[in-house]
Amino acid sequence: MGKKIQFSLIYRDMWQSSGKFQPRKDQLVRIAPIFIEMGCFARVETNGGAFEQVNLLAGENPNDSVRAYCEILHKAGIKTHMLDRGLNALRMYPVPDDVRAMMYRVKHAQGVDIPRIFDGLNDIRNIAPSIKWAKEAGMTPQGTLCITTSPVHTLEYYSKLADEEIAAGAEEICLKDMAGIGQPAFLGQLTKMIKDKHPDIILEYHGHSGPGLSMASMLEVAKNGIDILDVAIEPLSWGKVHPDVISVQSMLKNAGFDVPEINMDAYMKARALTQEFIDEWLGYFINPQNKIMSSLLLDCGLPGGMMGSMMADLGGIRASINNLRKKKGEEELSVDDMLVKLFDEVAYVWPRIGYPPLVTPFSQYTKNIALMNLLTIEQGKGRFVMMDDSMWGMILGRSGKVPGEICQELKELAAQKGLQFTDADPHTLLPNALDDFRKEMDENRWEYGQDEEELFELAMHPEQYRNYKSGQAKKNFLADLQAAKDAKLGAKISPEEATAFKHAKADAIVAPVKGQIFWEFQGDGEISPAIEPYIGKEYKESDTFCYILSPWGEFVDIPANLGGKLVEINAKQGSKINKGDVIAYIERPHEA
């Protein structure tokens, strides 16, 4: 019998790569025993990046879900693991040290065994502290290599990073092929290099199906010493998600590997129950495009999980570009034309911003730079004209060191803007924050929860947690669900239904001119990455709420009035509005 290979079910990532929300606690508790009954999983991914945030947005307590889910799996001897974004922990922007360190204590107490610690730039400075804190909390830290294909991402580059993570205390290494563009032969060679040098280190492979290489990659890494493979189950496998465990098991078994048997009766139960979750409510937030594989992903390297939001963003930019082209008497561009232009522009931008691995949040930043370039080129303004603080933060080194070199054009543009590059350790730029959050908990008389897990949720996701505690999150979610159901049924939503859950004491953000809506390019989470704001987002009086592209081609800043909390959005990215239309409603801060 050949080498033994285990399977890890990435149920959280299956939903993350398909749609907006995760199953509820009661659903996870129902399906966990069936995963056990399947008999083929040594591990299950239970939570991590975006899981907790989207639970809060649905008005659910993620701590209850994680505890209940992990307890069932632990009793059967199945290990649990979570996704951890290093410097960004469980969110899209950097997290202070004291909150990050607390996360491992809380998650271990809740029953999570293994944090998969990755950094979107593969910067060891963002990974090593998390490895240390995870070990101190009693967890098994898994270091991660974010796989991509570029001139700077060589075998030696990744082998060195694996050495650094193991030296920092990582007990396992994951090859995270988040876009599925890792070349099979390369991944096989990398697996062998690491295993030959570190034979006792457990290696796990995580590869998305998007461009279709993942099955070949799984066979190659298996031949070269991989220990664990991340797999999915129907009805969410394949597409932009992951290969199905049945196909992976069959392939490896035929190749002579020692793989676990699958209880097919239990598989069919899990398949049916997952479909039930989809039919009940989760399916209303699944983008159909994420069920389709595409070889076009190979050249641009964008991860499959963001393709749905990318297509929505592309539609808005296409409308603006075609409006400009029409005025110039030029032929309008089709969606396919725009898609090719975007992929070509990503290929142009990516090397010039230093080849950041295209994973959250840097995939969103890179895509947004390319989208805005297409628009500003059409306007005759050239490239790199519209970039926000998040995009510049990546370029300037505030989030870590990019693997390659920033081009001279961007260096000169930064100097013109008075922006400074930094090589400071990113986590040293953030002051500790727990004391302020403790004060807020005390002032609101909120319970800290078991092992201070409620304090952790506030500190990790402050805006979403406050919205959850007020009950507004649940109201917003129910309104979104009803609207999604009505839209799917083709029903016309009345004004009364559309405003049923709008906060009574809110100010309308009114369009001062006719034009087209564009949002700020900084989101908080994977729900609509880096473009469209989320319900519950808070604004200051001085903030810009959005931009309107006027008929004469200029962007008009729309202020957030007196500031406050966003409670309703009435316009989408790229949608056309008239002067006097209500764009959104913001709950005034003095009545929050």
Image (tube, rainbow, N blue to C red):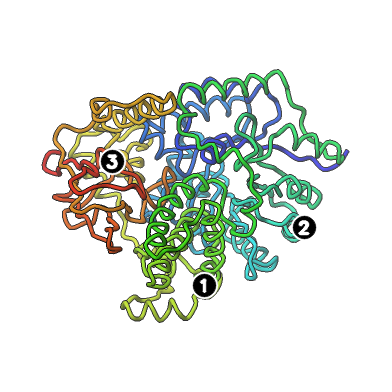
Please tell me how crowded label 1 is: few (under 14), some (14-19), or many (20+) other residues with Cα within 10 Å.
some
Horizontally, residue 360 falls left or right of residue 507, namely right
**Rendering coords of residue 574 (x, y %):** 36, 50
Location of residue 365 with respect to 571 vertically, above or below: below
**Rendering coords of residue 542 (x, y %):** 17, 58
Q: Secondary structure at mark 2?
A: helix
Horizontally, residue 100 falls left or right of residue 507, namely right
Q: Please give the residue where the numbered disc 2 appears in the rendered image.
A: 185
Location of residue 203 with respect to 379 vertically, above or below: above
Q: Please give the residue where the numbered disc 1 appears in the rendered image.
A: 352
Q: Amino acid at mark 2?
A: Ala
Residue shown at 52%/59% (left/top)? 342
Circle nearer the N terminus (2, 1): 2
Q: Amino acid at mark 1?
A: Arg
Point out the frontmost of discs 2 and 1: 1
**Rendering coords of residue 17 (x, y %):** 54, 41
Q: Please give the residue where the numbered disc 3 appears in the rendered image.
A: 569
**Rendering coords of residue 132 (x, y %):** 50, 55
Q: Is residue 123 visible?
A: no
Circle nearer the N terminus (2, 3): 2
Q: Amino acid at mark 3?
A: Ile
Q: Secondary structure at mark 1?
A: helix
Quarter of the figure that contains the C terminus: top left
